[in-house]
Image: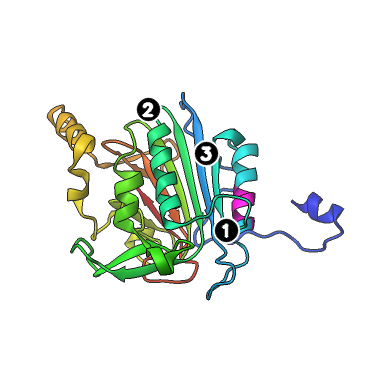
Amino acid sequence: MREILSSGRYTQIPQLTSSRPMNIQESFDLVPPDCSGERRALLIGINYIGQQGELSGCHNDVMNIKEYIIDVHGFPEENITILLDDGEHRDPTRENILDAYKALVSASKAGDACFCHYSGHGGKLRDDDGDEADGYDETLVPLDYQRAGQIRDDDIFNTLIGPMPKGVTLTCIMDCCHSGTVLELPYVFKADGTDIRSKTMMMNQGFNSSKFFFGDTFNQLIGESRNGFSTPPRRSSNGRKVASSPSTPTTNSSACDDDLGDDAVTMVSI
């Protein structure tokens, strides 16, 4: 980075800040070492051009992420779906976003690695089914939210998380407000150094375990529980705590906690 800045005659000195000590030499992989299948990605960026609350950097976020996952993590460009409100790509409407999630699930199979990125507005709506401890659903705000409505965390779970085939590794980055538990995952790791959740992975107190009890996911739980399957947190080779999953190993890195609109980073894994 210093060489790149110097070649452009920039004088900035690149710096990295974090809420806790970290080893920048430690590798980070979106794809597990034993991945035997395809790599697929869905990237969504919404600037809400011409609307109240217009943003300016979400398209750039998507293009930067696209370059990163191709160059660093080996995702083939033909396996990357992009939704942008730029007049060139498919619009990130409510229907198109949910359809894209469904298409990703339909195309995926055991051994695949999937990556989802969302850059846009996030919000909160009054919980409409009684499954939220704080009384609110976290939401994504699609391009046509004024007409079609927002995308609730329940919609995302029921469309993307719950139906994802067993054995697929799914990583998500939700770069929006109120996104700490927008995927409705059972474990929470909050990397801000303020409480016990910054030292270990904790159960998400608002998690509704009944979400798992439908269709194939229910059958997997029943079959694996009979074989002594359990889901306690385990440790990876570098000592970090991760969580076992009855179906799909899923990690969500969120830009904000559920009740915040700033850059408090919350990690949620299952």
13 with respect to 105 (left or right): right
243 with respect to 23 (left or right): left
Find residue 145 and report its horizontal and vertical position in percent: 42, 66
Give the colour scheme shown: rainbow
Find residue 133 and report its horizontal and vertical position in percent: 22, 66
At label 3, counting other C-alpha atoms closer than 10 Å, the crowd grade (few under 14, some 14-19, many 20 or more) is: few
Name of the residue lying farthest toward the left: 226
- SS class, disc 3: loop
User: In the figure, residue 74 lies in which quadrant?
Assistant: top right
Residue beneath disc 3: 29
Q: Does the magenta stretch include residue 63?
A: yes
Residue beneath disc 1: 85
Residue at the (34%, 58%) spot, across then down: 181
Name of the residue lying farthest toward the front: 147
- Judge depth for marks 3 and 2 and give the one in front: 2
Find residue 111 and report its horizontal and vertical position in percent: 41, 27
Ranked by sequence position, the earlier of labels 3 and 2 is 3
- Inter-mark Cα distance, 1 to 2: 32 Å
Residue beneath disc 2: 110
Ranked by sequence position, the earlier of labels 3 and 1 is 3
